[in-house]
Image (cartoon, rainbow, N blue to C red):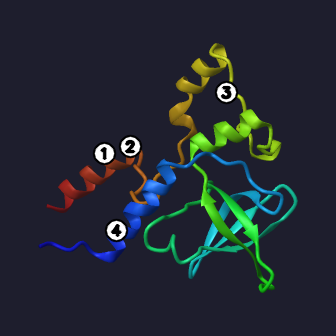
């Protein structure tokens, strides 16, 4: 009989929990936060409507759930920390965001900017797309064609 690894079954149960979530609204103590950066050691810097602070990831999420910059979390304050002020309760999915927006509890600070109307501005952006690109610093800069001709002349004279 094949036994699965404990971390696999834990991940399976966490994913099942997320999929069967009833999209319960946050309690009075919980806050919606956006991840600013990862500080390592299962600590993440987040921002809420009022402030920025560190949150810790509980053991049940470690090595099975990952968060990246820009993700939204539901955090609950903890008493024992000076630097770490909260712990992650839930990693919010786009479905959570839709439900929270419908309920009117999604912070205005985290709402996405409206998409510009399709028209001349979008066509202008498309034509200038290459102009917006930064130069690739991993490649040598192309020299002028006149320099190449001079190099060819000098190399033929040396032979």
Eye-nearest disc, 2 or 4: 4
42 to the left or right of 48 = left
Depth order, front residue of 65/71 = 65
Contact (Cβ within 8 Å) of mark 1 with mark 2: yes
Which percent across, then down, holds residue 82? 81, 85
Mark 1 to mark 2 CA distance (whole Å): 5 Å
Mark 3 to mark 2 CA distance (whole Å): 46 Å
Eye-nearest disc, 3 or 1: 3
Q: Which comes before the other along the chain, label 4 or label 1?
A: 4
Q: Which mark is residue 115?
A: 3
Q: Which comes before the other along the chain, label 4 or label 3?
A: 4
Residue 124 appears in which quarter of the rendering?
A: top right
113 to the left or right of 108 = left
Contact (Cβ within 8 Å) of mark 2 with mark 4: no
Secondary structure beneath label 4: helix
Q: Which residue is mark 2?
A: 146
Q: Residues within 10 Å of mark 4 (few under 14, many from 20)?
A: few
Q: Which residue is mark 1?
A: 149
Secondary structure beneath label 2: helix
Q: Which residue is mark 4?
A: 9
Contact (Cβ within 8 Å) of mark 3 with mark 1: no
Q: Which comes before the other along the chain, label 2 or label 4?
A: 4
Which percent across, then down, holds residue 131? 55, 36
Q: Quadrant of the C terminus?
A: bottom left
Q: Residues within 10 Å of mark 2 (few under 14, many from 20)?
A: few
């Amino acid at each position: 009989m094949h036994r699965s690894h404990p971390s696999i079954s834990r991940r399976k149960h966490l994913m099942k929990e997320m999929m069967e979530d009833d999209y319960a609204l946050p309690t009075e103590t919980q806050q919606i936060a956006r991840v600013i950066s990862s500080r390592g050691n299962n600590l993440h810097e987040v921002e809420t409507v009022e402030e920025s602070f560190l949150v810790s990831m509980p053991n049940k999420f470690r090595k099975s759930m990952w968060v990246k910059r820009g993700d939204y979390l539901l955090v609950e304050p903890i008493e024992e920390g000076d630097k770490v002020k909260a712990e992650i309760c839930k990693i919010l999915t786009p479905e959570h965001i839709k439900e929270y927006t419908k309920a009117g509890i999604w912070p205005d600070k985290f709402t996405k900017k409206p998409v510009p109307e399709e028209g001349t501005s979008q066509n202008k952006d498309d034509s200038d797309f290459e102009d917006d690109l930064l130069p690739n610093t991993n490649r040598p800069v192309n020299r002028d064609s006149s320099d190449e001709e001079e190099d060819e002349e000098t190399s033929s004279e040396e032979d």
